[in-house]
Each structure stands twice: as structure tokens, then as C-alpha cells.
Amino acid sequence: MINIFEVAETNKMIEEENLDVRTITMGISLMDCVSSDLSVLKKNIYEKIYESAKDIVKVGDEIGHDFGIPIVNKRISVTPIATVGSAACKTSSDYVELARTLDEAAKKVNVNFIGGYSALVSKAMTPPEELLIKSIPEALSVTDRVCSSVNLGSTRCGINMDAVRLMGEIIKKTAEATRDNDSLGCAKLVVFCNAPDDNPFMAGAFHGFTEGDKVINVGVSGPGVVKRALENIHGESFEVLCETIKKTAFKVTRVGQLVAKEASERLNVPFGIVDLSLAPTPAIGDSVADILCEMGLEYAGAPGTTAALALLNDNVKKGGVMASSSVGGLSGAFIPVSEDQGMINAVNAGALSLEKLEAMTCVCSVGLDMIAIPGDTPDTTISGIIADEMAIGMINQKTTAVRIIPVIGKGVGETVEFGGLLGYAPIMPVNKFSCEEFIKREGRIPAPVHSFKN
């Protein structure tokens, strides 16, 4: 039974501490849309998305109004399009047509983003998957709301280094294709190792093959709530610190569970998971980096940062998993640079480098996220950065990702503005030494020995 104290406490978290439900994401299977005729396929996709999600924005707004909980985004994820389009798409241009259809459907139902322009190629690429990957630069340059993701590796399969090499080229081409908008297309493109099937957050959301026809997944966010809680126990022991984070994560996740169940009932779509990630925004007081500083670091990136982040991530999961009937997605703490004012401050102060961020990804929820780098960075260097991050995920049996933005025409010392929740970012230096000969090798890095568990 919820008492009046808990209601007042939740209201305070919303009004003063930036608590929100970051997204309600409806996952939609498009497998029943498949056709060998491209025009039929496009019609099927548009109609399936419209009929499934036509009420998601209205219902999200109603829930936000009824419960007084800000619901920032309403989104859609779909079955990886590389598979959906494999029978009809004979060229990369055919896949671009599907991207346009997704964009039109997203605009019709008025969601913020639609994810699933994706390919899962952790072991090898089929011809249709390669066609979709090669279509990404054009697809993201001619659409507004489409997000793309490619899974390049897994603990079970190893790392597809041919795809890693290709994605370095694709990211550079996407940057070039959207250079008039500060290479914004790359902000809608992410590569994964061990991508989950039920992630509600963009740009990596897709509706996995293990999912049903439709599902509601919700992502909550409350870095400001956690920071305020830690301010109240300043200087206390690690035991008190951990307990406080767990209790706070429990409260935040309960809000997500409430919204998820309500959205499921009102839309008549099964509830999937609550993703309890601490997802920051550029707003002051809504920063994961500020939580780390409240623990005792001068800046994120100082010695001790990886340990502090590991503590935060683990206790967010421990507290949140008890608050929901089903926790999934990514769940933990995000460390995007452009979307977190504390991270931006740390970069500007010289406390946070690309290498330190990579170390932090060993213990956080995702990986190198929303990082702007010089536009003249070689594509092989980008592939090398991706390979390192994929290796962290593969060896540690966790999800890792790279969403990196080579901003064409800009270099270190300059800043790029993305706007909205994407924020702004200082352009970070990249290691100048070459990995070209390594990246040019063909084939894949085999799965690690601890993957053999049958």
C-alpha cells in the first residue's frame, strides 16, 4: 500500500530532483509484414506501425498528466530491418526506401524516434545485412527520426572484424553525409557487442527476435535523485553509501514499474521490462558525473573514478531489480559525454580522456557514448576504438557500445551543438598512432574460452 509520505517523496523527486520516465518504447514485430515485393513490404510496415502505435503518444501524455510524472519520450522499436527486408531489398537504395517508410510512420504517430534500422552480424554478414549496413549513411541523412544499430560481436560468437572495419568506414560516411548538421547522423548510429533484445533507449533499441508481436518497455532516469540522496549522507562509510544508492534506485524503479503497467493496460500491449538506467541530460543537476563527484572525486576521470562508477552501477542494479517484476534492457549508469554537463565539465578541465572513458566502460551499462572527435580521424582509427570496446564486452560478458561522432570540419578545442537531450560536446583528442594494419586483417576474433558453457 502506498502511503502519503511516499506520494510526497515522489513529488519532491519529480519537482526538485529531475526524476522522469525517460521513455515509453513500444516494440513491434514486423515479421508478419515480410514480402518479396518492396512496395507491398513498405505498405505492410507502415500499416503495422500505425495500427500498433497510433495511441502511444496520447496514452503517454495521459499517464503523465494523471500521475504527475514527466514522460519525456515516446518511441518505437522494430524487428531488425536487415532481416525484414531481406527478400525484397536487392540494393542498398531499396533499404533506404524502408528507412523512409519508418520515418513516415514515426512522424504519423508522432513518436520521437524509431529504432531498428539494424543488423545483427556478430559472427558474419549475409548479403542483405551488408546491403543495409552500406545504406546507413544515406538512410540517416534523408530521415529525421530513424535510429540505426549494428551488433558486431558477442561473448558466444566473438567479434566480426570484417564488420568492425566496415563500420569505421560507415561512421565516417555518415558524418560526411550529415556534415551540414554537425555530423548529427552519427548521433543516431550505435554499434554493440552483446546487444540486448529489449533495450528501450535510442539509438540502440530494436525489437529482438525473442520478443512477441508487441511489447511495452519503459526506461526510467533519476541521476538527480541519487545525487540528492548522497548529499544527505556526505562523508559516510561505503556501506552507508551503497545502501543509500540501493534504496534510491528502488524508489526510482517503482515509478517506472507503475508507468509501464499502466501503459500496458491502456494500450492493451503486454508489459516487457523496466530499464532502470541512470540516463543523464544536459540539465544542471541531472548528471551521473555529479554523482561521482558527490562520492568524493574532484572531477569524473580522477583516480578512483572507475571504482566509484562500479559501485554506483552495481547498487543501482541491486536496488532496482527488487522494485520491478521484470528488469531488463541495459540497466545501470550511462556515461554519455554530450548529454551530461558534469562529463562536459570534466573534459574541459582535462580530467577526462577517451582512454579513461574506455576504462570506465568496463563497469558501466553501455560504453563510449556521444563522444565528439575530430572530423579528420581516420576510419581505421574509429574501427580500432570500436574493436577495443567490443573486446571489453566480449571478455566481460556484458553489453558494450560505441556512439562516436567524427565532426567533419572541426577539431580539438572546438565545440559541437546537437540540441535537445543530445546536448553539446567538446571535441576530444584521439590517439594519433595507427592501427591500420591490425584493422585490415580479415575474419573474426574467436569467442573467449569462457564462452563454452554447454
Image: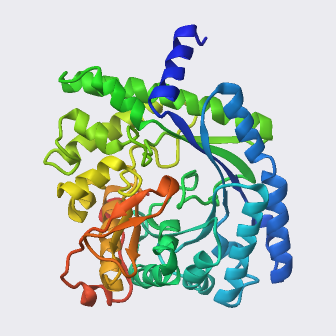
Determine the residue positioned at 19% across, 55% down. Answer: 349
Query: In the picture, residue 129 is in which quadrant?
Result: bottom right
Determine the residue positioned at 57% across, 34% down. Answer: 256
Determine the residue positioned at 37% across, 89% down. Answer: 442
Query: In the picture, residue 46 is in which quadrant?
Result: bottom right
Numbered-mark total: 0
Closer-to-camera residue (215/2): 2
Query: In the picture, residue 219 is in which quadrant?
Result: top right
Q: Is residue 323 visible?
A: no
Closer-to-camera residue (183/262): 183
Q: Is residue 450 visible?
A: yes
Closer-to-camera residue (150/419): 419
Q: Position of residue 123 (x, y in %)?
A: 47, 75
Q: Quadrant of the N terminus?
A: top right
Would residue 293 appear left or right of 101 to someone viewing this image?
A: left
Q: Residue furthest top?
A: 4
Q: Quadrant of the C terminus?
A: bottom left
Q: Residue furthest left?
A: 303
Say above or below: 362 vs 388. above
Would residue 155 appear left or right of 133 to someone viewing this image?
A: left
Q: Position of residue 341 (x, y in %)?
A: 35, 49
Would residue 296 appear left or right of 448 to someone viewing this image?
A: left
Q: Please say which color scheme the image uses.
A: rainbow
Determine the residue positioned at 35% across, 33% down. Answer: 315
Say above or below: 396 vs 308. below
Q: Position of residue 342 (x, y in %)?
A: 31, 47
Say above or below: 357 vs 133. above
Q: Position of residue 281 (x, y in %)?
A: 44, 47
